[in-house]
Image (tube, rainbow, N blue to C red):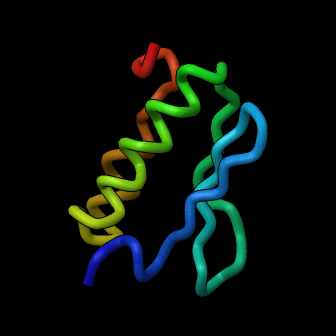
Amino acid sequence: MRARSRYDVLVVRDTIEVVDRDEGEGVLFWDCTARQRRRMAEALIRDLDRLSPEEFLYEWAVAEPRQFD
């Protein structure tokens, strides 16, 4: 099972939120600059297809927008 089947990535202005489809609640949230938002959203989407739901949360729980400057 891939993370894409469990999570949605919502990008609104300068925020990114990962929402659990089953619970309907946000599990991860970041405030970003426009540049960070674009790069971070691309990386999140790649990982949704690459990782299991557990691996995805483990990897992204420690992510910071400044890593995507």
Q: Is 54 in front, or is 38?
A: 38
Q: Position of residue 52 (x, y in %)?
A: 26, 70
Q: Quadrant of residue 30?
A: top right
Q: Which one is nearer the viewer's eye here, 42 or 48? A: 42
Name the residue: 28% across, 66% down.
Answer: 49
The mark tally for this picture is 0
- From the viewer's perspective, is 51 left or right of 31? left
When the figure is inspected, residue 2 is found, relative to residue 46, above or below; the finding is below
In this view, 5 is above or below 55: below
* Front-most of residues 60 and 37: 37
Q: Is residue 39 left or right of residue 15?
A: left
x 57%, y 59%: residue: 9
Query: Where 50 sits versus 12, above or below?
Result: below
* Residue 10, position as x, y percentages in the image: 65, 56
Q: Quadrant of the N terminus?
A: bottom left
On the picture, is 23 further left or further right than 7?
right
Please give the name of the residue rendered at 43% of the width and 21% of the height, measured from the top-left corner.
68
Vertical relation: 36 (above or below) 52: above
Residue placed furthest toward the right? 13
User: Which residue is at 40% across, 19% downward?
Assistant: 67
Residue 55 appears at what percent x and percent y? Answer: 27, 60
User: x%, y% of residue 58?
Assistant: 33, 52
Q: Quadrant of residue 43?
A: top left
